[in-house]
Image (cartoon, helix red, strand yellow):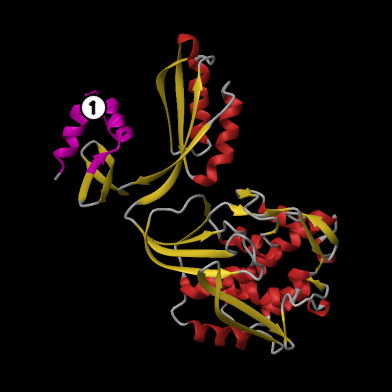
Amino acid sequence: MKILYFDCAMGAAGDMLLAALLELHPDRAGFLRRLNAALPERVTVSAEPDEKHGVRGTHVHVVIDGEEEGAGHGHHHPHTSVSEILARIEALDAPEQVKKDAAAVYGRIARAESTVHGEPVENIHLHEVGSLDALADVLGVCWLLHELNADKIVCSPVSVGSGTVKCAHGILPVPAPATERLLRGMPIQAGPERGELCTPTGAALLAHFAGEFGQLPAMRLENCGVGTGRKDFDTANILRAFLGESEEGSETILELRCNLDDNSPEEIGFAMERLLEAGALDVFTSPIGMKKNRPGVMLTVLCKPNQRDELLRCLFRHTATLGVRESVCPRYTLARSFRTVETEAGPVRVKTAEGYGVRREKPEYEDLARIAREQGISLREAVALLEKRP
């Protein structure tokens, strides 16, 4: 499985994502030619080597009417309606999936602005993110991700910065309200520097494409792209994109654990049922000794990173715990598949697990138990019927 991982320790901006992904592309010059051919004639995207605190990477330049984005010229950021942006995207000479993703990214931005300003989406006019330079960033990132074609995109917690930022509406706290709306549901942190580290464009792109958030997953690293930002900080202002192949059957999961000494067995059993219904991979208990020599139970929940918040709410609601511990764990699994085998007593599903040089088969308990009850025989005799099949 091909995995793409974004390291956003210094936040995320559209141009940094574009530059990092461009470093991963096998034909950078060819891609830039195709991107520039698709964009309006007023816009030109180029890339050049850059360095931040000794770390070499790529910086992307977007030039509009001969002037670069971020140069302080106000005419680069006119008010643009959402319908105008979507019409502009639809008219581009780019793959349909790329245009669909770009439109979805702008849809996220428009909904966030609509919520912040209390206006219908059709009345929203975008400022910085509606400009041509932002369109170049969004289209370029969507197109690069389309051609890199990773099976899974994972992102680190996103650093947002702190303090204030000056934008079209004045001076606002970091993260700006629209950025904060776009980041909801994603793990964020202040980060090592003051100022805006995550832009609305960067937040919208990550929200649209990242399927998981957490630590760097286990993978055989093939390449790493480094995109540099315009600003200079005490910390290297870079975004890294790691591309690699996951180990066979490997993934990252979370262990959520809490110690219980004042829940009844019935309450713990009910909580386990609710956790499994909420999508936990597994739930189990272990006997432990707690403070004041009290016997207790440690309740452990295994889950995927994107299930954390829902399962935490479930734990706090259905148990008396005051705190839950979290550990990030690599998990290695065998690939599983099912087939149905016909026996003289009826069909039996058989699970096959294979990988890492091993192969195992096991009949499903529920089917064997059904046969045993219907035939009035033991479970072992039901297994024997399966073994006697032609």
In the picture provided, is 345 more to the left or to the right than 331?
left
Which type of secondary structure does the marked residue at label 1 adopt? helix
Q: In this figure, which residue is indicated by the disc labeled 1?
A: 379
Between 364 and 95, the one nearer to me in the picture: 95
Can the viewer see residue 347?
yes
Q: Examine the image and state in which quarter residue 284 appears.
A: top left
Q: So how many labels did they put on this image?
A: 1
Q: Residue at x 20, y 38 (%)?
A: 344
Residue 374 image point, x, y percent? 29, 27
Between 364 and 232, the one nearer to me in the picture: 232
Residue 142 image point, x, y percent? 58, 71
Residue 90 image point, x, y percent? 67, 78
Q: Residue at x 57, y 65 (%)?
A: 238
Between 151 and 243, the one nearer to me in the picture: 243
Task: Give above or below for 66 relative to 307.
Answer: below
Identify which amino acid the numbered label 1 is placed on: Leu
Task: Give above or below for 73 relative to 282.
Answer: below
Residue 386 among magenta residues: yes
Task: Give above or below for 35 relative to 211.
Answer: below
Q: Residue at x 68, y 77 (%)?
A: 89
Q: Which residues are magenta?
A: 361-389
Q: Residue at x 24, y 36 (%)?
A: 345
Helix, strand or loop for the magenta stretch, by majority: helix
Can the viewer see residue 145?
no
Task: Give the position of the C terminus as an image quadrant.
Answer: top left
Task: Give the position of the N terminus as an image quadrant.
Answer: bottom left
Residue 365 image point, x, y percent? 30, 33
